[in-house]
Image (cartoon, rainbow, N blue to C red):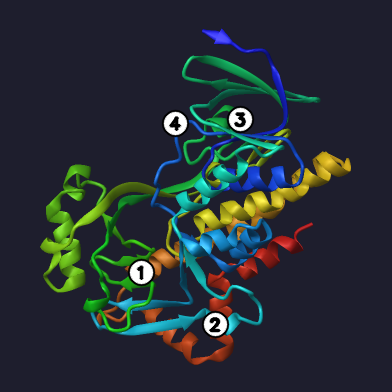
Amino acid sequence: MSVNPVSRVQVVIAGAGPVGSVAAYRLAQAGIDVLLLESRDELPEDMRASTFHPPTLEMMAELGLLDDLEAVGLRAPVYQYRNRATGEVIAFDMGEIADVSPHPYRLQCEQFKLTRLIAAKLEGHPHGRVMFNRKVVHFEQDEGGVTVNIETPVGLETVRADYLIAADGANSLVRKWLGVAFSGFTYPEKFLTLSTAQPLEPFFDDLARVNYVADAEEWCVLLKVPDFWRVLVPAREDVPDAALTADAKKTAVFDGLTGGAGAQVLTHHRTIYKVHQRVADQYAHGRVLLTGDAAHLNNPLGGFGMNSGVHDVWNLTDKLRQILLEGQAAQPLLARYDRQRRTVMHEFVQAQTIKNKKAMEASQADNRTRHQAELHAIAANPDARRQHILTQAMYPSRQREAQIL
């Protein structure tokens, strides 16, 4: 097995998903030499994350990417909480926070559209490079930098860098090599996502593009992206995956949504995944830095996962620019990154996503969820309604981060 001569770059990033891609592009745009590594031979058409919240849209605008994303996404200014049993609908309009946000809506756009956009912009970039079929398998750091060992289809490559950013996902090898604890829990059930080009609007009154449907038996989330409706439902852990992806399950899910027309619905994706609530005990490890799913995992209710990962690297790239371009001391800045982002993850993202999931499941004898009663009260109170919209848009989490020294 061949080993190439050591090459040199300022930052190596493991993982070319949305988090790693944004980190790479922002650093390259700042004039920092960056190498973005992707273990697969191409960027897959991953349907998992598809919601961009307003603060993230502001970041995309600063990078000059928002117009391109808008062209391939859908604006969703209104989101709804629905009760399957009673038919009640509570709607929240993000237009109410137009005084705070230049983008008072969610942009529904699959994450692969962002990663492919950035990969194209990095082609030929003087400070950025993307390499496929490259997997970080080991690293060693010292006072002067970090040596990164990379597996390729034909051998091993070695790169010397100032910093290594781990954006290599939930099963991060970098995190495992660090030996850092990944504290939290895994939900007992699995989540099943189905996508269909079949219009669902005819089966509902005034259906929004983002909908949370509460039900004690089987809650669901309905999200519209440009070409598909995405449907997420829970599934018991003891049900085999083959049964969950079978036509019978697909038909049952869509029967519940369409009133019996599920057999006629054609799906384009059927995906099963386990869901976790976990946070690494430490994000900053000298010159090796955890971000995104490598640093934290949460359930998808609210669309905070990808967005919080992008917020991680927005914070981190600010600090790396100060270190690499301005010569500021690294340890205090990276320790602050760790404090800021782990605090926000525990206080906001983890707490809010757990609350969102419980709200979808709980029910009372009259089939009206306790959460829905709370939402009625919130919707009727202008101040409470505004705060709810701001919270779901992730503005308080951004403010909280800025308060942490």
Q: Residue at 42%, 87% (x, y): give it.
A: 376
Which three-letter amino acid code belongs to the residue tagged 2? Gly
Question: Dot 3, crowdedness within 10 Å: few (<14), some or many (≥20)?
Answer: few
Q: Residue furthest top?
A: 1
Res 342 visible: no
Q: Residue at 46%, 81% (x, y): give it.
A: 92
Query: Which numbered disc, 1 or 4, marks the residue that appears first in the sequence?
Result: 4
Instruction: Decide which of 272, 239 is in the foreground and name it.
Output: 272
Q: How many marks?
A: 4
Query: Which numbered disc, 3 or 4, marks the residue that appears first in the sequence?
Result: 4
The answer to whether residue 126 is above or below residue 192 is above
Question: Dot 2, crowdedness within 10 Å: few (<14), some or many (≥20)?
Answer: some
Query: Which numbered disc, 4 or 2, marks the residue that appears first in the sequence?
Result: 4
Question: Dot 4, crowdedness within 10 Å: few (<14), some or many (≥20)?
Answer: few
User: Closer to the observer: label 2 or label 3?
Assistant: 2
- Tag 4, which secondary structure? loop
Residue pointed to by mark 4: 41
Position of 234 with respect to 283 (left or right) is: left
Residue pointed to by mark 1: 360
Query: Which numbered disc, 1 or 2, marks the residue that appears first in the sequence?
Result: 2
Question: What's the mark number on residue 95?
Answer: 2
Q: Residue at 16%, 49% (x, y): give it.
A: 246
Please report contact status of discs 1 and 2: CB closer than 8 Å, yes or no: no
Please report contact status of discs 1 and 4: CB closer than 8 Å, yes or no: no
CA–CA distance between discs 3 and 4? 26 Å
Which three-letter amino acid code belongs to the residue tagged 1? Met
Instruction: Decide which of 214, 208 is in the foreground and name it.
Output: 208
Instruction: Decide which of 346, 88 is in the foreground and name it.
Output: 88
Q: Residue at 54%, 65% (x, y): give it.
A: 53
Residue pointed to by mark 3: 178
Residue 355 position within the rendered picture, expressed as x and y whole percent measured from the top left? 46, 66
Quarter of the image with the C terminus is: bottom right
